[in-house]
Amino acid sequence: AHPQSTDQDYYVSWNNKQARDYTTAPWGNGSVHRGNLLEDRVKKLVQQGGVTRAALVRAMADAGLADLRAEDVLPKLLKVVTGAPVTDPAAAAAVTKLRTWVANGAKRTETAAGSKKYADADAIRILDAWWPLLVKAEFEPGLGSGLYGAMTANLPVDEAPSAGHGPTGSHAGSSFQYGWWSYVDKDIRAVLGEQVKGPLARTYCGDGNLGACRDTLVSTLKAAAGRTAAQVYPGDDVCAAGDQWCADSINHRTLGGIKHGKISWQNRPTYQQVVEFTSHR
């Protein structure tokens, strides 16, 4: 892919977007991209100075545990929701849990190594349930059911860890590559009156009305908060219904005589490489 910058001192690679003015084959690229999780951490390291191989590996590992929706989009959704007092108790409790999760780093991590239970489990469950509900409520009225259905058939609204991932199926690790996060991000920022580079053709949430948009988000948040773990994680041939950690987990395919157990989710790329140039490139 063409680089998105000129004379930058470093590059990250995580199925990067093409450069400005170059077209892209998959049309899910936009303002929020999986590479943000890595870029934001590496950029901070560079600004602090003294980048080491160990520090870069830590940045990669940290990015691999973060929920892209929670880190890059959820704060804007909550800004709309909390623009006025949230009087519904269920919605208010959900907001508190989601805010706490964001403050804790918006990661999908165990309470302790090997616990097979997530810290901030309720917040994770709520966002996993809320995301498809809010996207549908935000965009379907403006697009119409036919067009919305056609678009979601080509670009699913979500690629959370517990979802299926194309030919690899579920339990593969790789997550947040394709989805509607950029559409939600741009639309919500436009409704908030913020400047949006490359905006959508129109505003969709609440038909562009901030109060109506807030009502949409609050009602879908309340519905999501009421969904049980068994409803959000219905189970499969590997996991029991309601087992959140297992639903996300990476399940190894047995190719030889040794079988490996499931491991806790991490957003694993195709290749993980640590390379240091010892002389001029």
Image (cartoon, rainbow, N blue to C red):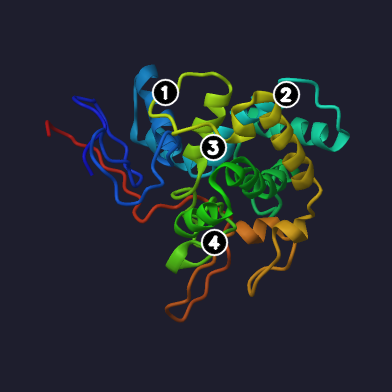
Crowding at dot 1, Cα within 10 Å, few <14 / some 14-19 / many 20+, comes out as few
The three-letter code of the residue at mark 4 reads Ile
Crowding at dot 3, Cα within 10 Å, few <14 / some 14-19 / many 20+, comes out as many
Q: Which residue is mark 2?
A: 82
Crowding at dot 4, Cα within 10 Å, few <14 / some 14-19 / many 20+, comes out as many
**Do the numbered discs 2 and 4 sit on residues whose CB atoms are within 8 Å?**
no
**Do the numbered discs 4 and 1 sit on residues whose CB atoms are within 8 Å?**
no
Query: Which one is in front in this view, the residue at disc 1 or the one at disc 2?
Result: 2
Q: Nearer the viewer, residue 258 or 212?
A: 212
Vertical position of residue 261 compared to residue 163: above or below: below
Which residue occupies the extreme bottom position in the image? 257
Q: What is the CA distance from the residue labelled 4 to the residue labelled 1?
A: 29 Å
The three-letter code of the residue at mark 1 reads Lys
**Do the numbered discs 3 and 2 sit on residues whose CB atoms are within 8 Å?**
no
Which corner quadrant of the image does residue 127 belong to? top right
First reached walking from the N terminus: tag 3 or tag 2:
2
Q: Residue at x 31, y 44 (%)?
A: 274
Q: Which residue is mark 1?
A: 44
Residue 236, how many percent across, how many down?
65, 71
Left or right? Give the position of 64 relative to 214: left
- Of the numbered discs in the image, which one, if any, rests on residue 91? none
Which residue occupies the extreme left position in the image? 280
Q: Which residue is mark 4?
A: 250
Question: Which element type, helix, strand or loop, lies under badge 2?
Answer: loop
First reached walking from the N terminus: tag 4 or tag 1:
1
For the question of whether residue 271 can be seen, the reply is yes
Q: Residue at x 73, y 42 (%)?
A: 220
Q: Nearer the viewer, residue 122 or 273?
A: 122
Left or right? Give the position of 124 relative to 166: right
Q: Which residue is mark 3?
A: 184
